[in-house]
Image (cartoon, rainbow, N blue to C red):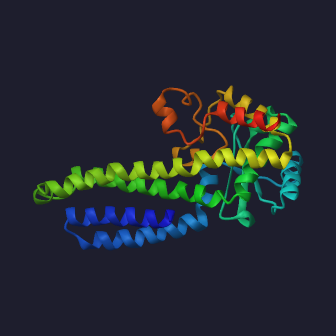
Amino acid sequence: MLMAVFLVLVIFLGFIFSVYFQSSEILYFAIGFSLLMNLIAFWNSDKIALSLAGAKPITREQNSYLWNMVENLCITAGLPMPRVYIIPSEQINAFATGRNPKNAAVAVTTGAIERLENEELEGVLAHELAHIGNRDILVATVVVVLAGIISMLADWFLRAQWFGGDDNHKGNAVVLVIGIAAAILAPIAAMLIQLAISRKREFLADATGALLTRYPDGLANALEKIGHDHASMSQAKTATAHLYISNPFRGQRGASWIAKLFSTHPPVEERIRILRGMSV
């Protein structure tokens, strides 16, 4: 459904382009482009997400502590061993990505490895493995590519309507208004898709991860440290923010009710409260 929505949005933008510039080739290009991007999003979105995060793959020999922890949790959860990556950042964070459990990857920041206790890091990893087991990772990772492409195309249209076309094109006020509206609303639609798939899935992954470790306080304690962590992450991108266990843009969590409304993550305090309730 997500890919179908993307297909329709891009073709609609292509139709507006083609009418505005009176060129049917633009519509044909939009159709081909949307099909190609869907294929790329399905097969390579995990590689794109890991690349944007600056994540580096590791082996057991390079970091046996992290590798063994992931492996033990996978055995408990009945999941295949994912690829393991480290993100060079002092911020406490992590994310999972991939098409399915057999092609999954888990990325953890150096800050999480260095600053979390064993049971806390185990809770974070269990949360990410829960995303893999719950089949959240494909949709969440595909959104990275699709939302970015939609935003890019919308930006192209807004630039083109000022710098491209002749006077006749610019005089077509109805098409112009529709095009501008579509260019503005398309990225908003992409963002709403991110919100819809992120917030509730975070609560579910918290619960699943807590059941996996049988120690909800481990993840709750980790989230408390994350809540007080103000380290920045230079690799943080808007397109990939929803993948992380917590918003990588520190300092923006409680800025206003608007910030909370459009946050890809539920409030850390609420997640901690629910986890504490599980341990009672």
Q: Quadrant of the C terminus?
A: top right
Q: Where is residue 248 in the image (x, y as percent from the top left)?
A: 61, 38
Q: Position of residue 75 (x, y in %)?
A: 88, 58
Q: Work out whether residue 82 or residue 212 is closer to the camera in this orientation and state it.
A: 212
On the picture, is 38 further left or further right than 128?
left
Residue 46 in view (yes/no): yes
Percent of width and height locating residue 172: 13, 57
Is 145 rendered above or below residue 184?
below
Q: In this view, does 99 lie to the left or right of 238?
A: right
Residue that appears at 81% across and 61% down: 79
Kindly identify the residue that appears in the image at 67 percent across and 29 percent down. Answer: 227
Q: Residue at x 50, y 65 (%)?
A: 1
| Picture residue at 83% right of the left edge, 55% below the top | 59
Residue 86 appearing in the image: no
Q: In the image, is 102 to the left or to the right of 182?
A: right
Observer-nearest of 7 and 82: 7
